[in-house]
Image (cartoon, rainbow, N blue to C red):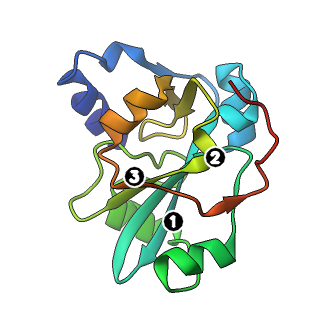
Amino acid sequence: MAIDKVKEYFKAYGMEDRILEFPVSSATVELAAEAVGCEPCRIAKTLSFMANDFPILIVAAGDAKIDNHKYKEKFAKKAKMLTPEEAEQLVGHAVGGVCPFAVNEGVTVYLDESLRRFETVFPACGSSNSAIELTIEELERYSSYTEWIDVCKGWEGGTDR
């Protein structure tokens, strides 16, 4: 299971005990916010796409939506999310638990600007009933991200630090 891969990943940093597992689903932003007990905007959702023949992940705030124009400017093609089957095969995590940790080789991770307004966020941990609270600095450190990008809309003016 992918959560086991993520636990093993965080174990290398002595952080596996920070992973939260819930008796209920946290597969959507709303369910995750309810399970964690935070505002939906603080859920760090991980969206999977194919860009230039390679899978990419964009970690964005729960209230952000992909802006097709910004996405196309950045990646020179229209945003097309991976199917659930493609996400599991190419990324290594099933939809509902996709996260930027312990992903398959060749997956590029980007962090969206919509996250910078928070001190801490809650990304999933490889299953549809898990999360971990991380500071933005920890998210940068453990996600192996490539760069910060600005490809989302709808979050401006939302809850901030």
Between the C-alphas of marks 3 and 2, the distance is 23 Å
Point 23% across, 65% down: residue: 106
Residue 140 at x, y percent in the picture: 38, 38
Where disc 2 sits, the SS reads: helix
Is residue 117 shown to the viewer in this render? Answer: yes
Q: Single out the mark in the foreground, 3 or 2.
A: 2
For the residue carrying disc 1, how many other residues have a C-alpha within 10 Å: few (<14), some (14-19), or many (20+)? some
The quarter in which the N terminus is drawn is: top left
Residue 114 is tagged as 2
Q: Which residue is mark 1?
A: 84
Residue furthest to the right: 157
Q: Which sits earlier in the primary sequence, circle 1 or circle 3?
A: 1
Point 58% across, 59% down: residue: 150
* Left or right side of 60 for 126: left
Point 58% across, 73% down: residue: 71
Is residue 1 shown to the viewer in this render? Answer: no
* Left or right side of 74 for 2: left
Q: Given the image, on which type of amino acid does mark 2 rest?
A: Ser
Q: Which sits earlier in the primary sequence, circle 3 or circle 2?
A: 3
* Left or right side of 123 for 160: right
Residue 93 is tagged as 3
The quarter in which the C terminus is drawn is: top right
Residue 128 at x, y percent in the picture: 54, 40
Residue 35 at x, y percent in the picture: 67, 24
Where disc 1 sits, the SS reads: helix
Q: Given the image, on which type of amino acid does mark 1 rest?
A: Pro
Q: Given the image, on which type of amino acid does mark 3 rest?
A: His
Residue furthest to the left: 12
Residue 79 at x, y percent in the picture: 58, 77
Q: Which sits earlier in the primary sequence, circle 1 or circle 2?
A: 1
Point 71% across, 23% down: residue: 38
Between the C-alphas of marks 1 and 2, the distance is 24 Å
